[in-house]
């Protein structure tokens, strides 16, 4: 039996995967199951099967990107979902590097990539976020929120879910007019502009992306609020002053474990005594792990998804109180399904901007992310921190009341 047959027979037991090799020979794996679906793939050259089987962490992605693996029935999302659904995180099934040496090398590479000194942090951010604003406009919502939305109803539009995400975060921050807010990793400025418009606060947004900074400043100027909503190209480690509130959405994943304590120490020092901070981050459901090879190489160099345990352990060292912790278990899968469909719908424009290989890389990234949030060990955490235990109301009732007010504003 060929190595690829052994590999696929272990991965697919429910649902059907049909493989056609470069010579036109076909065989199927799994058993028919309508809940898992049917997918058919084809290898276009003699070496593709061996490459995929011998490189379980990266081989399928690169073979797909290079056109050596072609999905002929279904699409790449169906293929990845079929594999991941057969081994859901809750059941304990997952792909593992079985070779001890390869596992050690992978872990070492992941640890080295997490060292995000300031110069490296800017390069890593540019690798992903400076791809071009026109590209991100093709698949994000109109406010360009590149993070997990909040679906009060799974049937809601992406635009509505992103508005609800901003309202959910704003409500938790317990904002008062005139307060000063720091937005670490402000993206294209949508959150900062929303907080000022709905809550009357002044916001400083900081980013390491020159492309994002340009748009954020243009949006503040167009809204006539540049005196109240400012954006700077600066590392959070170099920010000075004091802030009543700090919000950070989708940035903590780029900090890296070696810098977690530094991050929380800096944030605590930036907060006023009655200050409140909210961190919105992708997180692991289980124990700390490593960044997968595909993400590390092609998508987020220097990125790392933290476990809740290591995030809280790092913040405890700075005497920050975790006043509220919420796990968003299903919302990011719903979010990225919208991004995936918009990417597919804009294939021609993306290929014209970059090339076919980039388009397939991006599609593989989004498809893999969907399956990770739907069947893998990832979700989102919103952690609300205070310096003083009296800084927030004694119950969580204020969150729902404020969300209701914000919902009426739209």
Image (cartoon, rainbow, N blue to C red):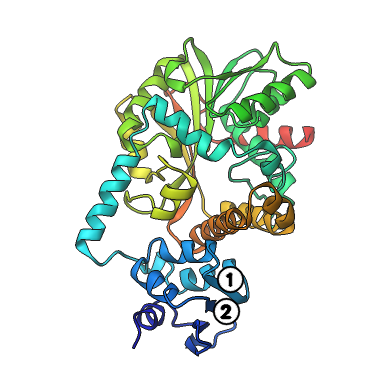
**Which of the pair 334/179 is nearer the observer?**
334
Quadrant of the rendering where the C terminus is positioned: top right
> What residue is shown at x 44% (from left), y 47% (from top)?
283
Q: Counting other residues with Cα less than 10 Å from the Cα at mark 2, is it few (<14), some (14-19), or many (20 or more)?
A: many
Q: Residue 39 — which label?
A: 2
Label drawn at residue 310: none
Instruction: From the top left corner, tell me how far across and down residue 197 is, in percent.
Output: 73, 23
Residue 320 place in picture, x, y as percent: 38, 26
Marks 2 and 1, the one that precedes in the sequence: 2
Relative to 107, say whether 376 is above or below.
below
How far apart are the two marked residues, 2 and 1, measured between alpha carbons? 7 Å
The image quarter containing residue 99 is: bottom left
Identified at 26% across, 67% down, the residue is 98
Measuring 54% from the left and 78% from the top, which residue is drawn there? 42
Name above or below for residue 69 compared with residue 222: below
The residue wearing badge 1 is 78
């Amino acid at each position: 039996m060929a190595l690829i047959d052994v590999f696929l027979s272990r991965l697919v037991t429910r649902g059907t995967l049909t493989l056609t090799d470069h010579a036109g020979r076909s065989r199927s794996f799994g058993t028919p199951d309508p809940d898992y679906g049917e997918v058919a793939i084809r290898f276009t050259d003699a070496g593709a099967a061996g490459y995929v089987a011998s490189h379980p962490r990266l081989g399928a992605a690169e073979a797909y990107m290079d056109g050596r693996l072609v999905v002929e029935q279904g699409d790449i999302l169906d293929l990845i979902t079929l594999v991941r659904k057969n081994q859901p995180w809750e059941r304990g099934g997952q792909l593992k590097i079985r070779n001890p040496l390869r596992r050690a090398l992978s872990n070492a590479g992941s640890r080295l990539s997490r060292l995000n000194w300031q110069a490296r942090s800017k390069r890593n951010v540019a690798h992903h976020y400076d791809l071009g604003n026109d590209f991100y406009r093709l698949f994000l919502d109109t406010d360009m929120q590149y993070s997990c939305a909040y679906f009060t109803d799974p049937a809601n539009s992406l635009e509505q879910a992103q508005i609800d995400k901003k309202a959910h975060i704003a409500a938790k921050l317990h904002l008062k007019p005139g307060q000063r807010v720091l937005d670490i990793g402000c993206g294209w400025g949508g959150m900062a502009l929303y907080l000022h418009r709905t809550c009357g606060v002044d916001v400083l947004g900081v980013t390491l992306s020159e492309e994002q900074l340009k748009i954020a400043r243009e949006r503040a100027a167009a809204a006539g609020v540049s005196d109240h909503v400012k954006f700077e190209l600066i590392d959070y480690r170099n920010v000075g002053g004091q802030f009543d509130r700090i919000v950070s959405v989708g940035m903590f994943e780029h900090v890296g474990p070696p810098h977690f304590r530094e991050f929380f120490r800096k944030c605590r020092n930036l907060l006023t005594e009655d200050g409140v901070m909210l961190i919105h981050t992708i997180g692991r459901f289980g124990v700390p792990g490593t960044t997968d090879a595909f993400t590390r190489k092609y998508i987020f160099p220097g990125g790392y998804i933290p476990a809740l345990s290591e995030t809280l352990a790092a913040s405890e060292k700075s005497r920050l109180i975790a006043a509220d912790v919420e796990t968003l278990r299903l919302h990011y899968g719903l979010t990225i399904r919208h991004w995936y469909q918009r990417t597919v719908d804009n294939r021609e424009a993306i290929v014209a901007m970059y090339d076919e290989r980039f388009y397939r890389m991006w599609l593989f990234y989004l498809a893999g992310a969907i399956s990770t949030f739907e069947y893998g060990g990832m979700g989102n955490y919103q952690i609300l921190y205070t310096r003083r235990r009296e800084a927030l109301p004694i119950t969580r009732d204020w969150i729902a009341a404020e969300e209701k007010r914000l919902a009426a504003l739209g």
